[in-house]
Image (tube, coloured by chain):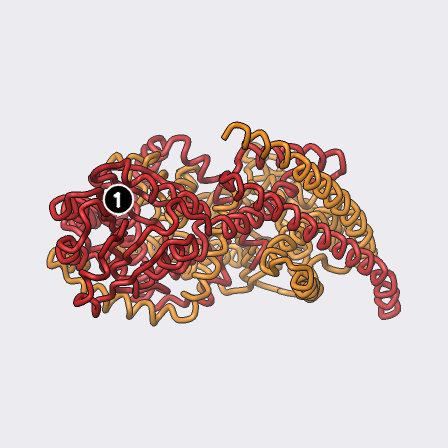
Chain colours: A red, B orange
Amino acid sequence: MKKDNKNFDEQIVPLRDKIDSIDAKILSLLAQRQEQVEKVVALKKTHSIPVYHPAREENLISKLRLQSQNNGLDPDFMEDLYRVILRQSRVEQTQKMEHKGVKPNAKVLIIGGAGQMGNLFAGLFTKSGYKVRILTEHDWDEARNLCRNIDLALVCVPIERTGKVIEKITPFLPPTALLADLTSVKKEPVSKMLASHGGPVLGVHPLFGPTLTCLDKQIIVVTPGRDETACQWFTEQLGLWGAVIVTSTPEEHDEIMEIVQALRHFATFCFGEFLCQRQTKLARTLEFSSPIYRLELGMVGRLFAQDSALYAQIIFATKERRALLKEFILSLGRHVEMLETNDTQLFIDKFNHVAQWFGPFSGQAMRESTFLINKLIERF
Amino acid sequence: MKKDNKNFDEQIVPLRDKIDSIDAKILSLLAQRQEQVEKVVALKKTHSIPVYHPAREENLISKLRLQSQNNGLDPDFMEDLYRVILRQSRVEQTQKMEHKGVKPNAKVLIIGGAGQMGNLFAGLFTKSGYKVRILTEHDWDEARNLCRNIDLALVCVPIERTGKVIEKITPFLPPTALLADLTSVKKEPVSKMLASHGGPVLGVHPLFGPTLTCLDKQIIVVTPGRDETACQWFTEQLGLWGAVIVTSTPEEHDEIMEIVQALRHFATFCFGEFLCQRQTKLARTLEFSSPIYRLELGMVGRLFAQDSALYAQIIFATKERRALLKEFILSLGRHVEMLETNDTQLFIDKFNHVAQWFGPFSGQAMRESTFLINKLIERF
């Protein structure tokens, strides 16, 4: 047996060396590829052409899938691999493109620029050649000066202070300045901005946290308030930074966010709170976990890694939200009897009804999450 | 502007051609890499050496990270890429290795072999050189014959029939045959097997659905019943098929599964049911969705893409489970007052308490889920 293992070691070393040398060649080709991509970026920059070119990407993937079959490689594997390569290439292109300003030298005032989100946007604007001024809560004496000749005033303060800050800043704004906010509710701030300021108004809600370094494919909802034409350059700039822009009304936005933010986070909070209450043995539980559970528990853990005050803000933001969450709790109460009577048939009926309502989304969700589960298995 | 675009097209075509030719070279190197990996597999097979070699993988990754820095490539990107390549290589190796039988020619009876899970295991055993016999519900007249000289009887029937099937099959079993089941609860089936059969007994719970084609890194919990030595070959075989084996007692297993399966699925069911009740506009909601919400909603949709009867079984399996779920609903009820009184401070206190309890897991969950969110952005 020992001799056998020695034999194995002797035979495997040259094979591994060969694999290592192939890997070195792949690496050098990837570096060459990156060089070419950089040239493409430079060209796109000169011609102000957007980074993301879906048709070119899909084309490239189809071609590679075909070629891999001819080379005895699994096309799904090849696609996986090139999605990683293309994303990297897109991120690099975006990082280089984001310097491009739609309205360079325009003056931007970030109100709450010392906060994380204000800071993120201050950085983006600065890189793109804008003149950025910051107003923190200690600078109100300077407000008149800071507002002089500005093109955009961007309100980035916590929800509960947004209304007051809007009222406080508007007397100093030039009448043609664009007034926008980044709050995660839109009805109140937008109507407050419209009431206080006579110029262009735009509600903006970036659907991501302030820790991002790149807006690539991140969603930003904009809810136009007044004079869309005058707001155009700002929306375009967000797009050039890589974000996907979704346009909505403040009402629709808030209604959807009740679900997307308040309800989902609250449900996750309740789940985590129950696990804690029962003192569940997390570590052992994870050893027993299928990747899907690991992923779901990860979503719960993720929430609690973040700022409690921020989530309190999001969840308790409006009385509509709080009413919705109460309704949710009551809807759960209606399942108690089904559990007490062990009525599996009722469960099956309810389940099938919901499944029908979800329709084709379920199948898609299954595919997407299976893809992710494989990624999780790959990595951890 | 038009002339400008023409100019751009002329300049970009040669760059894209160059990128395409680099991609073709990478593809051919990947095919060469696969050839070498196949030789490694053949060698491992001869020497009965397991496929997964964590140290070699981590070694390779570290080396590549270093090399990428020297080549101006992002090490994280390189790691991402090679995780995909290594997984593919592992899957291929596993698929080739799984033919290897620990106890080839042993006789295996799959009870419920017409079901999906029975079918999956019948296929795995057959490929590994075992003599597989199938007993479906129509074959009970043949039971005595089918059980003659078998080495393993594997019960793969739905939970509610497991007990009866165990009682029915044991009179026909050779006294030395290993009796095992694949049910997702373990206390009842294992004690039933121990009571009915005097030979080796093993409880087995594969934590995955029957649609898998490869057990690579999938978790299987085993709960030893009697004569672990005589069960050894079966556990080893599961490992050789690529699964990760976790050993537990039936009691611990069931307690953890109350959380991992029943509670999590039930919470997901409740969330989906509420969305359906409110007739939420799913499609528009998704347009407004940050990747994390898309992922979370995907988890919900995923549940409803699956078999309602299966989930009814899992959720209602035992009275302990139903009691736990009732307790969960009641725990949510305790949050109503906090919502009614808009008590954000209480929310923050509860949140921080849970966050502390989650401890380092939160940070890890944050990293893992961020990784997955990036994958999701990459792909969809």
Q: Which residue is label 1 attached to?
A: A338
Tag 1 secondary structure: helix
Q: Horizontal and vertical percent for residue A172? A: 16, 55
Q: Residue furthest top?
A: B2
Question: Which of these two is toward me, B360 or B336?
Answer: B360
Residue pictured at 18% horizontal, 46% vertical = A175
Res. B230 in view: no
Is residue B225 toward the left or the right of residue B289 in the image?
A: right
Residue pictured at 34% horizontal, 37% vertical = A351
Residue B333 in which image quadrant? bottom left
Q: Looking at the picture, does residue A256 appear above or below residue B6?
A: below
Question: Which of these two is toward me, B27 or B335?
Answer: B27
Is residue B77 toward the left or the right of residue B187 in the image?
A: right
Q: Horizontal and vertical percent for residue A305? A: 37, 65
Q: Residues within 10 Å of mark 1 (few under 14, many from 20)?
A: some
Q: Looking at the picture, does residue B351 appear above or below residue B294?
A: below
Is residue A205 toward the left or the right of residue A360 in the image?
A: left
Picture quarter with the N terminus of chain A: bottom right
Q: Horizontal and vertical percent for residue A317? A: 19, 53
Residue A5 in which image quadrant? bottom right
Residue pictured at 49% horizontal, 51% vertical = B374
Which amino acid is tagged 1? Answer: Met
Picture quarter with the C terminus of chain A: bottom right
Question: Which of these two is toward me, B208 or B55?
Answer: B55
Question: Which of these two is toward me, A357 or A192?
Answer: A192
Chain where mark 1 sits: A
Q: Horizontal and vertical percent for residue B268? A: 35, 47
Res. A196 in view: yes
